[in-house]
Amino acid sequence: MVHAESSTFASGVSKAEAYEQVLEQARALMDGQRNWVCNLSNVASLLYHALHALPAPSNATNWCGFYVLDPTKAEQLILGPFQGHVACQTIRFGRGVCGAAAASATTQLVPDVEAFPGHIACDGASRSEIVVPVVQTGKVVAIIDIDCAELEGFDAEDQTWLERIAALLAEGCDF
């Protein structure tokens, strides 16, 4: 059985150790559970707490969550489970960082959101962002969206681990 302590991360762990714990705990939490709301809720919490256990800039993460494919409108995302301040409720494919990731089905690693054309500022404190698509049978079904209050808050290591988490979610959830 997995308990609330799953989202407890020791300070001073390496980024790889924190992400490995997220993957391990996510697998355990998802065992026998395919509901995307349940699984994305737990993974949002795991990621948020893991990033806050790391040194700067990761600990300046100010939003961590998901947008999912809107079942009522083609090529639109709707807000899913998250940790942080309230957020935009819908985002069209191609609009902002999330929409760019959804439209292209590729990770968007943005070191400075002010330099990203069409960036949607849900939280004015956000300075950098990473958005990773969750692709199931060739179709984007959700995106992982993480914002940081510092410039260059994410790097290639974050991208690699978040893409692994996205693959786990695509494999383990019914969207």
Image: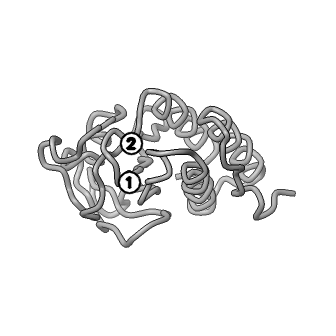
Label drawn at residue 82: none
Q: Position of residue 151 (x, y in %)?
A: 30, 44
86 horizontally vs 112: left or right: right
What residue is rendered at 43% in x and 27% in y?
A: 156
42, above or below 113, in the image: below
What residue is rendered at 55% in x and 35% in y?
A: 167
What amino acid type is highlighted by mark number 1? Leu
76, above or below 106, in the image: below
Q: Position of residue 128 (x, y in %)?
A: 31, 46
Residue bearing the label numbered 1: 69
What residue is rendered at 77% in x and 60% in y?
A: 5
Find the distance from the CA under tag 2 to the CA under tag 1: 26 Å
Residue found at the far bottom of this picture? 86
Mark 2 Cα-neighbour bin, 10 Å: few <14, some 14–19, many ≥20: many
Q: Position of residue 60 (x, y in %)?
A: 44, 54
What amino acid type is highlighted by mark number 2? Gly
What residue is rendered at 63% in x and 59% in y?
A: 42
Circles 2 and 1: CB distance less than 8 Å?
Answer: no
Residue bearing the label numbered 2: 153
The mark that comes first in sequence, 2 or 1, is: 1
Residue 39 image-quadrant placement? bottom right
Q: Position of residue 18 (x, y in %)?
A: 65, 41
